[in-house]
């Protein structure tokens, strides 16, 4: 028996004394996919015009060597990341990652054939795909407004883009046999305080109605709308606020996307999950780490990340919550960023699955808050790390920090030569 197996055996016994079956926890964990975001690998450049600057309130800082320059490189980097992450997961694509064979294809003319290579690759790697229209870094978004623009022709273009992307998402889901979540986020807003807040929200509602009018099969595609408090260049007013999209999602039976960096710095999405799911069937999470603003830092094992996982597991929401990541750090090795963030998300889910939730609920219902607090604190020092290492080994990925050596070798052999 290896050291990892011995440590796991000891941990299994400790958790069993609390009524927790670690084998069951691992089995449940293996069925929860996390959707990695393709844009971490190339700093949200995409393939449409990779040398163009970002706009729409998006900023990737740093210039670490080895950035992916084309689809083949990006897919290769993703494959390396997936090989170091336990479990079977998904990939989240943006429309700007279309492969058009060098031809200029406007975003409102994109079809599933421009993502055929991605679909084939996902099928070969047994991955699900998620999708996003790209309402930024485009001449028709230069005013800061897209679906909520006062210009009817601008709105029409972006409405057509949204419709095209829903059809692409549906085809992705159909081709892979795994439901695609197509998420709508727009940057629309004002840097300074507007006089008329109402008109843009009326326009946005009407634009969304037009996008969602064509029927798509929910077996293959689910629609989500993503709220935001503020952004760079839209500090004073964002059209698609939380209240706007909460109402829209509830009324129109779409998913609501909650991004961890899209709220006030003292506001957390973990507290919103159970509230939102009282009124919408399913939600999408964009798990990020905002520091003072929506800075999209790499996800680490914070109290809030653990709280997000606890809410999902305690509420029995694993079938109703779609977990995706959304960060982009160009100051460190980009593959390492994927691996660190995703492994931390999975660790948080494991910690939640190892919790004796039923016992804690009984204490809470009995009003024994002293025992509840004492048990919650004792859980923090239990050997979940031994269970995590065993889960990694069981999935044929490096345990502990051994994965970093593989990333460093890949950087030496592949990334450094770009």
Image (cartoon, helix red, strand yellow):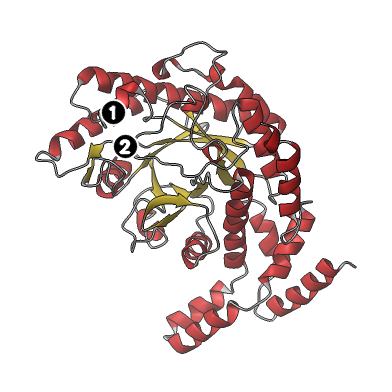
Which residue is found at the position 41% from the left and 50% from the top?
A: 295
Q: Is residue 187 left or right of residue 107?
A: left
Task: Name the N-terminal-most of marks 1 and 2.
Answer: 1
| Towards the viewer: 263 or 43 | 43
Badge 1, how many Cα within 10 Å: few under 14, some, many 20+? many
Is residue 228 among the parts visible in the rendering? yes
Seen from this angle, which residue lies furthest left?
A: 195
**Is residue 182 found left or right of 135 in the rendered image?**
right
Q: CA distance from mark 1 to mark 2?
A: 8 Å
Residue at 56% x, 22% y: name it: 115
Residue 4 badge? none
The x and y percentages for residue 222 are: 46, 36
Identified at 41% across, 41% down, the residue is: 59
Q: Which residue is mark 1?
A: 146
Mark 2 Cα-neighbour bin, 10 Å: few <14, some 14–19, many ≥20: many
Provide the secondary structure element on which disc 2 rests.
Answer: loop
The secondary structure type at the circle numbered 1 is loop
- Residue 342 vs 123, above or below: the answer is below
x, y percent for residue 199: 14, 34
Dot 1 and dot 2 residues touching (CB under 8 Å): yes
How many circles with numbers are drawn on the protein? 2
How far from the left and from the top, in percent, is residue 346?
Answer: 61, 56
Please give the label number shown on residue 187: 2
Residue at 71 percent across and 47 percent down: it is: 407
Q: Please identify the quadrant where the C terminus is shown.
A: top right
Viewer-proximal residue, 284 or 101?
101
């Amino acid at each position: 028996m290896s050291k990892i197996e011995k440590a796991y055996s000891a941990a299994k016994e400790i958790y069993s004394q609390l009524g927790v079956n670690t084998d069951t926890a691992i089995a449940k964990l293996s069925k929860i996919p996390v959707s990695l975001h393709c844009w971490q690998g190339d700093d949200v450049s995409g393939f449409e015009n990779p040398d163009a600057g970002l706009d729409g309130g998006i900023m990737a800082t740093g210039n670490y060597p080895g950035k992916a320059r084309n689809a083949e490189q990006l897919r290769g980097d993703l494959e390396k990341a997936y090989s170091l992450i336990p479990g079977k997961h998904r990939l989240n694509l943006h429309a700007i990652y279309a492969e058009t064979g060098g031809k200029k294809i406007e975003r409102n003319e994109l079809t599933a054939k421009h993502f055929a290579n991605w679909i084939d690759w996902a099928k070969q790697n047994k991955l699900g795909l998620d999708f996003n229209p790209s309402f930024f870094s485009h001449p028709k978004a230069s005013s800061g407004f897209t679906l909520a623009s006062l210009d009817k022709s601008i709105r029409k273009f972006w409405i057509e883009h949204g419709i095209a992307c829903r059809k692409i998402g549906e085809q992705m889901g159909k081709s892979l046999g795994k439901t695609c979540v197509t998420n709508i986020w727009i940057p629309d807003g004002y840097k300074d305080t507007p006089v008329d807040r109402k008109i843009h929200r009326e326009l946005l509602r009407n634009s969304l109605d037009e996008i969602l009018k064509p029927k798509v099969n929910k077996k293959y595609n689910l629609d989500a709308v993503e709220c935001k408090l503020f952004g760079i260049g839209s500090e004073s007013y964002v059209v698609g606020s939380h209240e706007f999209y909460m109402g829209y999602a509830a009324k129109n039976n779409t998913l609501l996307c909650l991004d961890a960096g899209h709220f006030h710095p003292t506001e957390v999405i973990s507290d919103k999950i159970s509230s939102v799911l009282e009124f919408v069937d399913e939600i999408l999470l964009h798990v990020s780490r905002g520091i003072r603003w929506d800075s999209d830092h790499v996800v680490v094992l914070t109290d809030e990340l653990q709280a997000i996982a606890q809410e999902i597991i305690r509420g029995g929401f694993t079938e109703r919550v779609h977990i995706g990541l959304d960060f982009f750090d160009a100051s460190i090795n980009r593959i390492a960023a994927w691996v660190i963030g995703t492994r931390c998300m999975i660790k948080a889910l494991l910690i939640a699955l190892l919790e004796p939730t039923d016992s804690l609920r009984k204490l809470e219902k009995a009003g024994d808050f002293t025992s509840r607090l004492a048990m919650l604190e004792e859980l923090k020092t239990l050997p979940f790390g031994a269970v995590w290492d065993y889960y990694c080994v069981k999935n044929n990925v490096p345990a502990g920090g051994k994965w970093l050596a593989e990333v460093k070798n890949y950087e030496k052999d592949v990334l450094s030569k770009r």
